Image (cartoon, rainbow, N blue to C red):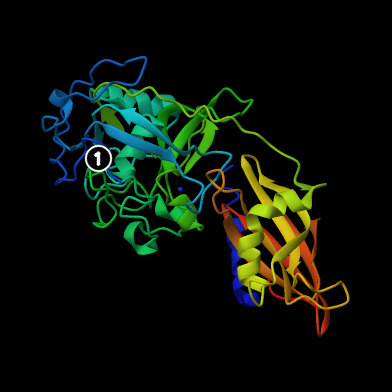
Amino acid sequence: MSSRTWVAITAALAGVAGVACVACAPGCTKREPQVLADAGSPVSSGSAIASSPTPSASSSVGAPRPGMAWIPPGVLRAGTPPDRVPRVPDEELPGTEMVLGGFYIDALPYPNEAGAIPTSNVTHDDAAHLCEAKGKRLCTEFEWERACKGADNSTYEYGDAYRASACGMGVAIEHAAKRPSGERVQCKSDFGAMDMHGGVWEWTDSPWARGSSQSNLGVLRGGNALAGELAGRCANAIGRPTSSKGPTMGFRCCAGPRNAQTNDLVVKPGTPLERSVKPADVGAPFAAAGSKKWGASEAAPFVSRQAWTWHPSANEELFIVTGCARSKEADEKRPPSGCGVMIGRVPPTPGGEPVVLTSIDSGRDAAEVVLFGDARHLRMRGLDLKGSFLREILYAYGRVDVGPVKR
């Protein structure tokens, strides 16, 4: 990685800090979205329910409603699984499956008119009252996420690969909120919901139940930010006091029986970096990967020297193993074939292979790793034929990036 790339990664991490504080369901098939022009006439919202509805055959297809897309019953994989990036582990569920009943959602942000500037400067209650005046209601955050992810539970409304141009992401929200609705035809989920990203943040009817001590926080979804890859995900959310309003805060409406699930994520902070007293035990799952990376042959297995548990963020636990690949017949006087650092997660299943997020050469000796600044930053010290060197390690929303060599 070049120094220029490393600077860009650091800048993106800093820029997104203000934003956040990313298979087809059974019985759910792709089809052409069912959307009509909004005639502005009220429609029945149905009754709210205390628990999630159970999909039935009779509710698999909704009757057309002006300006609204029908979201069929199905399974939402809420949040972002650990094997996908970017992700915000202390704010998102880890791909938790939940069954949602069918409902309707406005095709566009309020006033739900193509070419109109989305309504903004509204509080949560203002938004709720405007939806009620139309015979509708605010969407819950998981209804919003289901409408965005579509039947395949994709990361973005248009698929799993980020494309800034699809929704016009990567733009300061102050400018993006003034865009007319409906101009970006690719910014549409396969259910027919449009402009869920790229413009205003949208109020939902869900509390920010993510371990916060503040009881007055509501959830907004969508929006825009300079860190578009992160903010443009269907799973992304921000929490704000429900009394807040501004030129970047808007909403859209839903109708039909309410899906009542909330994000009751338990936020578990951990010691940022803790050295293991049993590095061989921690390093054992990583031995095969280390031998493949640094061993000259199978006769030179990787032997862990040191290990740490790293918590760069709440709800994120990584393991760091340093060591060298050394011939079984060699003694300490003979140099190893290679040394390095591996950072990853434990095997998802007992006895399986670990998930190695990055491997870093440390030269001719096992590296030392220390915290460098906050919990997301580490510094590694290595030794090669040119002498000692340093490399910085940065955790950024599920990714582990490594800076250039410094001497």
Residue 102: x and y, percent?
Answer: 23, 29
Q: Residues within 10 Å of mark 1 (few under 14, many from 20)?
A: many
Is 336 or 56 nearer to us in this picture? 336
* Horizontal side, residue 370 vs residue 311: left or right: right
Q: Is residue 369 visible?
A: yes
Residue drawn where x is 53% and y is 35% of the image: 239
Residue 387: x and y, percent?
Answer: 84, 81
| 352 w.r.t. 71: above or below | below
Residue 153: x and y, percent?
Answer: 34, 45
Residue 128: x and y, percent?
Answer: 36, 25
Q: Quadrant of residue 6?
A: bottom right
Q: Is residue 109 visible?
A: no
Q: In the rendered structure, which amino acid carries the disc numbered 1?
A: Asn
* Horizontal side, residue 246 vs residue 323: left or right: left
| 381 w.r.t. 260: above or below | below
| Viewport quadrant of the N terminus | bottom right
Residue drawn where x is 77% and y is 52% of the image: 279
Is 295 or 52 nearer to us in this picture? 295
| Viewport quadrant of the C terminus | bottom right
Is 406 or 185 nearer to us in this picture? 406
* Horizontal side, residue 107 vs residue 83: left or right: left
| 81 w.r.t. 6: above or below | above
Q: How many marks?
A: 1
Residue bearing mark 1: 112
Residue drawn where x is 54% and y is 50% of the image: 352
Is 365 or 166 nearer to us in this picture? 365
